[in-house]
Structures are given as C-alpha cells and as structure tokens.
Image (cartoon, rainbow, N blue to C red):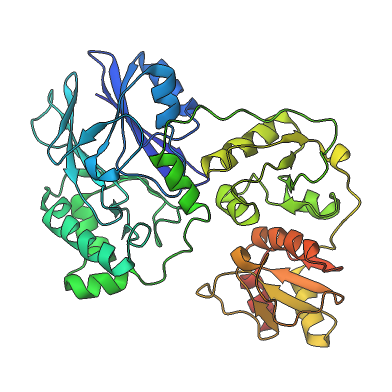
Amino acid sequence: MIFEQLIHRDLGCAAYVVGCQACGEAVVVDPPLDTASLEEVLRRHGARLVAVLETHTHADHVSGHGALALELGVPVHVHEAAGVDYPHVPLADGTSVRVGNVELVARHAPGHRPEHTVFLVLDHTRADEPWLVLTGDSLLVGDTARPDLAVGGDEGARVLYHSLHEGLLTLPDGVEVFPGHVAGSLCGRGLHAKPSSTIGFERRFNPMLAPMGEPAFVEAANRDLLPKPPNLQVIVALNRGPFQPRPVPPARLDAVPDGAPVLDVRTSADFAAGHAPGALHAPAGSTGFGNRAGWLLAAHDEPVLVADDEAAAQHAARLLQAVGLLRQRGWVPPAVAGRTEAFEVLEVEALIDGLRDGSLQALDVREANESPAPLEQALLVPLRLVGSADLGGLDPDRPTAVVCGTGTRAAIASSLLARRGFHDVRPVIAGGMSSAAACAR
C-alpha cells in the first residue's frame, strides 16, 4: 500500500496519496494547487496517478484538480451534491474506487458542506475492513468541522452531528483518522499539531464528541469560530468552476508599474527598516501568510511582490495562488521598489512606558477572544478590519504603537495604517501582548 500525507503548512491543509505498490497506481485526495510534493511522492514510488478524489468543494484553498485533469487527463471524483461545473465522476454513498489491492469507499458525511464525503481506506492484502478513514473537514484531531461556510451554522451543525454519530463514530476504535486540516487552519479551533489520530482516541478525548446531545453540539460547534477565510467566495467559485490551468509564476520586473499594488513579502524587520511608500506587507516566511494577504488584497488585484530574490518571490506567489490570488504582476528586489519609508520598531517596555506617560496611542490588532485582554489604553481592531474600520478616534498625527500576539500581525497592520495616512507608526514586532501584559503588572 502507498499512503502519504501531504501538508500545506501555510494553510494547515492536508492531502493524501493512496495507491498500490503492486500495480504502481495511485489516487490523490484533496490535492493542493502546487502539486510539486505530489509529483515527488509519485516519482519516489514509481507510481502513476489515475484519479483525483475530492472530499468536498474547498473554501479555504484552491484545489489542484484542474491542473491535474488538464495535464494528465485523470478523472475527478466528487459527490453528486457538489454542483460543480467541470467534468467529473459523481460519487454517491458507498461508491468504491479500487486501485490494485487498495480500495477507497465513499461515505456521505454532510455538515461542513452538503456534499462532504469521507473515504474509508482498505488494504485487501491485510484485511477486508477499513484500516483508516480520510475524514476531510468532518472529524479533525481535537475538534470537528466548522458548520457555517456553506449554510447557516445551526443547520450545518445539526447535519454534522448526525454524520458523526450515525456514521464515523460507528467505526471501530482502531480505525486511524487522517483529517483534511491540521493546526493552522481556519476550519478548526483547537486543532492539534499531531496530524492523525484514531476513532477511539477522538471518541474519548475530543471535546466535541463528548456526550452532549444535538442542541448542545449545535451551540458548541458555533462558539468561538475563527474568522472565515477572506477569499471564501472566490475560492469556492474557482473550485466549482471549469478546470483552470496551472498559474504562471511571476517574472522579475525592472520597475514597479504605475498604479500596481505592492506587497512586500520580506521579514517584518527588513520591511520596517525601509520600504516603498504605500507598500502593503505580509512576511511570506510566517505561517498564515496566504490568508493574511487575502485580507490585504482584493481578489482581482495583481500585486508586484517585493522579495529578496527569485526563490522568495516564487515561494510567496505559490502561497498567494493557493488562496485564489492567482495572478501577480511580477516581482522586484527592494532596491528597485525603493526604501524611503521606515517604521520605528518598539520593544514591549517602550510600549508600556509610552502608554503610561501619554506619548503613545496604541492599536491592538488581535481578535476579541484572544488572551490576554487588551491594555486599557489600546484600541482593539482585528487585523482583518484595520484597512476599512473606524479606528475610534486614533489621531493620524500622533505616534501610534501597533501590537498583536507575537509581532507578525502588528507589522502587517502598520503597513495598512501608513496607507491610511498615519505618519508615525511604531510596530511591536519582537513579542506581543503576552509580554506587554506581564510588563504592565
């Protein structure tokens, strides 16, 4: 049996290569847009890809099924309720996909989305019963799916409750669980870094599977949900629509075209030290870059990337493309973009001192449910709203400190404040609110 998990670390998404060594064939479940890791696995096993299986229409990342179908001619299998506009093999409950000695059996498990399907995986050289289950976004390690991306949260949670208790939880305790998301995803709350589990372990220790009844589950499933993926509608449309060819990598430019949005993807320290006036910023080396960039750019934007070298630019472009920002105008090194604007970087102690003596005003760009609570003198506006929200009377002419949990979001928000006319922006990029709260005490 061939079985490999492919994790997209920036988004916390997982894909799976499942196949048979004897026949040299494999299928991929929920493929990423960047198929380099898939291609490496196939080369290593000497296997040929024969099909793509989708657990559902994804809302947080663009699937690679289109590129694979166009380039390799492989069929795409998806549940008949998905309503897709591309050629596909419709899956129904109980449908079997066989690859040599390995069999994948589709089980309809709606709730996260109406078409959501899980796949029982059997290796008939060992046993004629499931060895593992690919749970997609239904059952996760330490959580269950968010129910509010395709329908109302209460409706989705009620359906999900029955899919779990009448479907997945009827499997034996020893069946291994391999989910479609791991830590870092917006599709779960307390996801564990461990990328797999078992039915028995989740039954005992997953708080969402504790005995509680349907009404309590519905309430719990809709509590403290993370912000929805910023490009949700765009990504769903791409994943349901006609097959799209592989995105084109951005080329190096000799100058920044007039009017083009500029996204500086270098480290936050390098950005603060000097950048092009009006440039947006998100560090491509920090986990969550794709989603954060989705809150900075509109779906139709074609940014020019500022990166240290071509490898860094191409890496950033692949992460942007994964969240539906398929086109970049090109990339330039920082010397070409210009570095005439800079931010004074604050230490946590300087933030506390400035708030105490009144020389600073402060913006906290975390979500409202994050701990610890914001400092009394700080305005709380989540990063995703900084570009458009009312900033509550902050004076653009006063020195403005920006703080978050660890520093990454503070640097990103600082670029937005500068674009909104704030003249003296001072991000706290080495540490965040945990340190600030300790100092304040």
Q: Quadrant of the C terminus?
A: bottom right
Residue 290 percent location from the top left of the image: 57, 47
Question: Residue at the location (21% across, 61% down)?
Answer: 159
Residue in the image at 26% along x and 17% along y: 21
Q: Picture quarter containing residue 266?
A: top right
Residue 170: image x %, image y %?
10, 52
Q: Is residue 359 left or right of residue 307?
A: right
Which residue is at the far right? 340
Q: Position of residue 371 (x, y in %)?
A: 53, 74
**In the depicted view, which residue is nearer to us: 400 or 202?**
400
Q: Quadrant of the N terminus?
A: top left
Q: In this view, does 242 lie to the left or right of 74?
A: right
Location of residue 230 with respect to 102 vertically, above or below = below
Q: Pick whichever, 195 or 263, lies toward us.
A: 263
Q: How many marks on residues? A: 0
Please identify the quarter of the rendering in which residue 79 is found. Answer: top left
Q: Where is residue 374 in the image (x, y as percent from the top left)?
A: 62, 79
Q: In which quarter of the image is residue 44?
A: top left
Vertical comparison of 126 with 400: above or below = above
Tell me what residue is drawn at x 14 percent, y 50 percent: 173
Is residue 350 visible to the viewer in this orientation of the structure? yes
Residue at 78% from the left image edge and 66% from the top image edge: 420
Question: Please, is residue 90 above or below residue 423 in the view?
Answer: above
- Decide if residue 184 is in sight here: no
